[in-house]
Image (cartoon, rainbow, N blue to C red):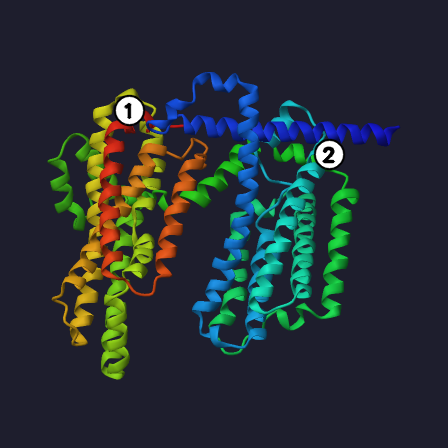
Amino acid sequence: MDMINNKNMLKIYLKNIFKIKTSINANTFIYYFKRIWLIGKILPDSIYSNINLKNIISIIITVLIQIGKIFMKAAYLMLMIWYPIILSSKASLPTDKIIALFVNIFFYLSCILGALQDSEIFKITREKYVCLKYMKMNPKDYVFITMSTKYINHFVFYLPILVIGLLLLGGTVYQAIVMWLALICFRFMGEALQLVVYDKKKIILSRNTGFVWIAIIIGLALAYVPLLLKEFFIITNVFYSIPFITLFIILGVLSFYYIYFGYKKYDSNIKQTLDINFLFSVAMENAQKSTFTDVAVKEKDLDILSEKDKKDYGIIEKMSGFSYLNAIFFKRHKRQIIKPVIIRILIIMILFAVGVVIKYIAPNGAIEIAKYLVSSLPMFVFIMYFMSTAEKACRAMFFNCDISLLRYGFYRQPKTVLQNFNVRLLRIVSYNLMIAATLSLAILAFAALCNINVLTIDIAMLVLAIILISIFFSVHHLFMYYIFQPYTTELNVKNPFFNIINSIVYFICFMCMQIETASSIFTLCVLAFTILYIAVALIIVYKKAHKTFRVK
């Protein structure tokens, strides 16, 4: 009888968890969709109370999320594993060597890093907080349900992707299944380790920033160093041996048993990790460290009256209004915003110096490099994506300025919002233009040094495109910040459209890099797209920013 009651209770919990999760997804989608310019008004406010329509939206979102997970796993294998191998000097190795490198990277990234830096047991989500704090669900049952649904989903989606990936590389289904079993076993080992450490030390490994970063550094080194060296140990040498397979399966089974049947303190420990003091002192602190630590202001940043800065400070003192406010802001954020610009410029200059050395050591090689550079606009689209400092500047603005000032009505006035936007846009564009100008001059100088005629329309269009792309990314990140304002008071990124659009932009930039040479048509398309996007983005900001730029 008890077993039947327990099964019924688990079914009720599963149903309620699903309802809560889908309801949160639907409400989040509706909230942000209604704030999209022009089309947002399609959905009336009454939709929040329309249960049937919300259920349809929830089902659609759930299906799309599942489809997205399949594509994300395929993209992960391609971008994080296959593509680095292709770019390395190992690309010409025999099929068995390529597969060995593939397995090695997968093992350290997915089996080791994935297990250590993530934990479903100790993960904090809105639905978890609602279920355990307000609905008083049994913590043990909640953990079992969420772990089972996540990992069944995760593992089922991974198997066909791994099989297809290995077959395309020339491997076998057996190799893919062993990789899949290792993924399952090491994930359970990771969860069991999290439980043991918390039980003994009251430390959650996946939330410990120091531990996670050490694991990331070591894991990435073990995964990718073999691509750079001729001889280096890789796990594949023992991965498919019967003793190793037997070992990780046994440990995986024992970990599974410990998680589901052996551990007896879920009720007390899971509740403890959801304590409100714990959430704000640990989870929020880690969120700050992971997302905003590189833009946090130090005491030395506040001193703008040093000898070398007195001249600039005199100029700032003559300013007024928001020009003065932003001048002080950017002056205090030289380390976070201006220093990266200087570093990028120095890297370009160093690469140019290396090119000059190559010119005199291997003239023919230098000429080939120069020819490649002047015809590689697709590559520079991707490079400028990472060269831009706008995204970091936006995080600094929010964390050190807007999160506080947006609480005041005067700061949210339409005129104020646009004045601030204009000043910031000019600043960020000027910084990114410095990078673009340095890059363009380096390309022209190196090409001229290699006796390539730089006074051509194609090269002029290349330079113009690089400059426009730098402006494009300046406008894009500020546009995304002011229209979607994705950061919350808890220092999380909650806006799904912000993530979706940024992912699309990244994907487009990445796909551009797959084009080996740029035709005049491609260059013209890039120029037209950047100009159109900049114009549309600015129009939307000027019309809508005063309504969307809020603290959430």
Q: Which residue is mark 2?
A: 141
Residue 519 vertical placement versus 232 (above, below): above
Q: Residue 293: give x, y in percent of width and height.
A: 41, 45
Q: Is residue 364 left or right of residue 176?
A: left
Figure label count: 2
Q: Secondary structure at mark 1?
A: helix
Q: Which residue is mark 1?
A: 412
* Observer-nearest of 180 and 337: 180
Q: Tell me the CA gap for discs 2 and 1.
A: 46 Å
Q: Residue 171: give x, y in percent of width and height.
A: 61, 68
The disc placed on residue 346 is none
Q: Residue furthest right?
A: 1
Position of the N terminus, as image quadrant, is top right
Type of the residue with mark 1: Arg
The residue shown at (26%, 42%) is: 533
* Observer-nearest of 8 and 230: 8
